Image (spheres, rainbow, N blue to C red):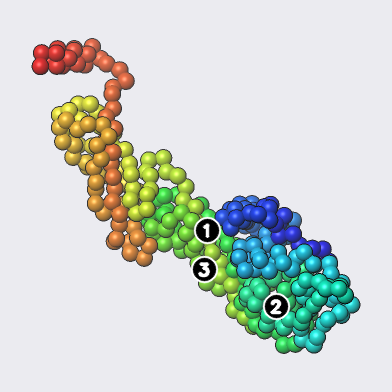
Amino acid sequence: MDFKDYYAALGVTKTATDAEIKRAYRKLARKYHPDFNPGDKAAEAKFKEINEANEVLGDPEKRRKYDELGANWQQYEQAQRQGAGAAPGGWSAPFGSGPGGAAYRTMTPEEMQELFGDGDPFSDFFHTFFGGAPAGGRTTGRHVRSQRGQDFESPVDLTLEEAYGGAARRLVTTRDGKERTVDVRIPAGVKDGARVRAAGEGAAGHGGGQAGDLYLIVHVLPHPVFERRGKDLYVKATVPVTTAVLGGESTLPTLSGSTLRLKIPELTRSGRVFRLRGHGMPTVGKPDDKGDLYATVDVQIPEKLTPEARTHYEALRKLDDTQ
């Protein structure tokens, strides 16, 4: 059995921060997700590997215990083969060394399960070091406690329009070797980085335990017209020079597909901001509770002048010179 280097699996160093580990996992999860690599066994194996690595390194306590235990993995594996220090119903784990060699103490299955919670391990390495039923259905000789299934994560891209009005995604997952189609409803107002939960759509539980959950990790794509800041939206209001000077109206787009009319007072300067209440992003679970829309005036200079327009602008310049 080979040692599982979870840091190498995620492509990070042992000094990586929690944020760096999270970013690395999300990037790899998207790259190797079975939905994006149908029928690719190598990608499927890699996806399982990075999920196992994230299960360990994504939790500070689990990561600490992995770092402590991992350094002595060869001693531990040898003791397991020889039965050294083993007691009925328990596993032996290395905790330092003494004059007579490595020192061991017996850990119960409950302690081993506490190391990594109720997650559903993937590899023999994980089971050998951290307890639970080894792969292939073998047990430690004691009653195997039920374990909740592993949670899965899947990245999903949304347009700002979809984030505004809500969206649906259909995913294909695999459980017990069978494909499952899962329809997930994404609520209106969802933010970038949000986790949308599909209960019970993760890995199957072990020993009668309940299934894990599936989480969609939302990434809201940049929009060419609108900028989102929390619940508020920002947009440019393109205004001709004549409208800025004399006053008038400007038409604004909305994410719902309709348009708004913005009243422009006379002598409006470029950069002035107008607030339109209730035309921003909705609150998740409260579609009628919306932020505001902020329109920044962008006074447009004409690209070309007709002879008639030039005559009028020259007349205005002469008028300015006399004032």
Instruction: Return the residue at label 1.
Output: 217
First in sequence: mark 1 or mark 3?
3
Residue 107 rendering spot, x and y as whole percentages = 73, 81
Residue 155 vs residue 111, the one in the foreground: 111
- Look at 74% across and 56% down and name the residue there: 42
Q: Earlier in the sequence, mark 1 or mark 2?
A: 2
Tell me where residue 103 sits by quadrant: bottom right
| Amino acid found under the numbered disc labelled 3 | Ala
Instruction: Answer left or right for 65 relative to 94.
Output: left
Position of residue 270 relative to residue 20, above or below, is above
Give the amino acid at mark 1. Answer: Ile
| Residue 288, placed above or below residue 260 | below
Picture quadrant of residue 307: top left
**Residues at badges 1 and 2 in contact (C-beta under 8 Å)?**
no
Q: Residue 97 appears at what percent x and percent y?
A: 81, 71
Q: Residues within 10 Å of mark 1 (few under 14, many from 20)?
A: some
- Which of the labelled discs sits on residue 56, or is there none? none
**Residue 198 image label:** 3
Q: In the image shown, does 172 or 266 lie closer to the viewer?
A: 266
- Choose the circle earlier in sequence order: 3 or 2: 2
| Residue lying at 28% horizontally and 38% vertically, measured from the top left | 296
The reply to whether residue 156 is in sight is yes
Classify mark 3: helix, strand or loop. strand
Q: Which residue is mark 2?
A: 112
Q: Who's the residue at 52% across and 68% down the image?
A: 198
Q: Looking at the image, is mark 1 or mark 2 nearer the viewer?
A: 2
Q: CA distance from mark 3 to mark 2?
A: 29 Å
Residue 1 point in image, percent of width and height: 83, 66
Q: Badge 2: few (under 14), some or many (20 or more) residues near its Cα, within 10 Å? A: some
